[in-house]
Image (cartoon, rainbow, N blue to C red):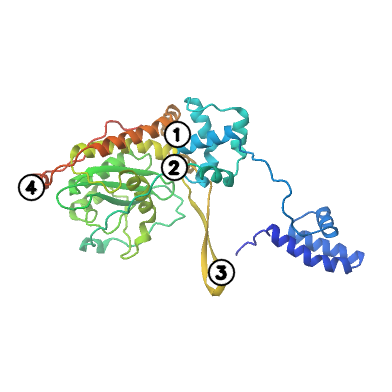
Amino acid sequence: MQTAEAMTIDERRKYLGLMTVRYARASKKERSHLLDDMEHVTKLDRKTLIRLINGDVTRHARQKQRGCTCDVAVSDVVRIIAESFDYVCAERLTPNLPWMAQCLAQHGALTLFPSVSAKLEQISVSSVRRLLQQIPGQPHHLPRPATGPANSLTRDIPMTRIAWDEATPGHFEVDLVHHCGPSTDGQYGHTLQMIDVTTGWSERVGMLGRSNSVMQKALTRTRERLPFPIIELHPDNGGEFFNTPVMAYFSQELQQTLISRSRPFHTNDNRFVEQKNSSLVRAFVGDQRFDTMTQILALNDMYEKMWLYYNLFQPVLRLAEKEVVPVDGGAFKIRRRYDVARTPFDRLCATGIVSKDHQDDLNRKRDQINPRRLKDEVYTLLDRLLSLPCAKISKEDTDASPIIPTPKEDNGAQ
C-alpha cells in the first residue's frame, strides 16, 4: 500500500486559495468544519490557517535574501574533508562530515573550532552540494573490456542475481578487470574484485595472467582477509571462473558457499561490482597495460592501502526503497530512495556478524590512521605504478608461469 506524500508549499497555497472562497461564504459552524478539513489536509495548525485565509495566500518573492550560513571556516573544513573522501557526492559526504572532521583534527590535518563543528552537524545536503560545485572532482575512465562467452560447465550453475535489499553480509558479486591496454597479445595483468552487496565491502587483488592456479590463489587471499564469511559468490559467465580446476577449488575450499552466475545478456546482474570496476579500478589505473611482476606487485601495494581507505573511511550509499510511480502517457518510472551514507565497516558492525575482538581491532586500526595521509599514499603508489615500464611481448612472456604476489601485511583482517 502506497503512502501519501506531503504537500509542497505551492500545492498547499493553491489548496488554501480554493478554500478561501468557501470559507468566506460559510457560516461560523461551517467554518469550524472547514478548518478541521484544512488542518487534516495541509498539516498546518489552526492559527496559521486562519492567518493565511484572512490574509494573502499568494507566495511572494523574498524581499531580503538570507545570509550564507556556511562561512569561510566551514567551507574550508568541508573542502578538506571532501578531498580526504576523494570527492564523493554530497549525499554520501554530508552525514559523515562530523566524525571525519574529528578524525582529521585528531591527526592535525585541520583545526576544528566548536562553532564549526556545530555547523557541520546542521549543514544540509543542498549546502554541501553548492560547496562541492567549486571543487574539481576526479576524471572517469573507460569501462572494462568485454569477456568471452560461457562454457559448458555453467549449465549446472544457477542463473540469478543477488537481491538489492539483501540484509545478510557475505553475498559477493565477483568480476575480473583486464589490464591489457590496446592489445590482448601475450600475458597481462588482471584485477579480481569482490563487492559485498549488503555492506559495500570491497576486496581487490592484482594478478599476472588468469590461469587456474592464479585464480585459486587470488580467491584464497581475499577469503583469508575478509572479516566475515562468504555465503555466496556471484561472477559472470567467464571461463576464468567456470573451469574444472576452479570448480574443484569451490567444492573443496568453499563447500558451504553458494555459487551462482549472471543470466546471459543481462549485463546489469552484476551491477554493484561493475560500478566499482569503474570507480575503484578504472578511475585509478585507466586502460594501462600491466604485464610485469613488478607492476603487479606495485598494483597490490596500492590495493592494500585502498583496502583500508575504502572499507574503513569511505562512506557508501545503499538503496533503501524502490517505488513504481506512474507518469504521463500511462508509463511508469522507478523512484529510488537511499539510506544515510555510512562506511562499509560501520555497516558491517551494525549487522552484528563480526566478532567483538575483530571489531575492536579494526576500530583501533581506524583510530590510528590519518585518512588524509592514507589517501595521499594511495595516489603516491599510483604514480609509482604508472611510471613502471611494460615488458616486450615475447614467447618467454607467454610461456611464463604466473604467480600472485603475497602482500606484505594483513591489515588486521582475517
Which quadrant, please, contains the C terminus? top left
Q: Nearer the viewer, residue 320 or 385?
A: 385
Residues under labels 3 and 2: Cα distance? Answer: 34 Å
Residue 299 against residue 170 in the figure, above or below: above
Mark 3 or mark 1: whose residue is earlier in sequence: 3
Mark 1 vs mark 4, foreground winner is 4
Q: From the top left corner, tell me how far across and down residue 393 is, in percent.
A: 12, 47
| The label number, if any, that marks residue 326 in the structure image | 3
| The label number, if any, that marks residue 344 in the structure image | 2
Mark 4 vs mark 3, foreground winner is 4
Mark 3 vs mark 1, foreground winner is 3
Residues under labels 1 and 4: Cα distance? Answer: 52 Å
| The label number, if any, that marks residue 395 in the structure image | 4
At x 83%, y 53%, the residue is 47
Find the residue positioned furthest to the bottom: 329
Q: Is residue 230 visible?
A: no
Mark 1 or mark 4: whose residue is earlier in sequence: 1
- Answer with left or right where residue 202 lies relative to residue 32: left
Q: What amino acid type should be assigned to the residue bearing mark 4?
A: Lys
At x 43%, y 32%, the residue is 372
- Answer with left or right where residue 249 lies relative to residue 74: left
Residues under labels 4 and 3: Cα distance? Answer: 60 Å
Q: From the top left corner, tell me how far across and down residue 229 is, in percent.
A: 36, 44
| The label number, if any, that marks residue 356 in the structure image | 1
Q: Which element is circle 2 on?
A: helix
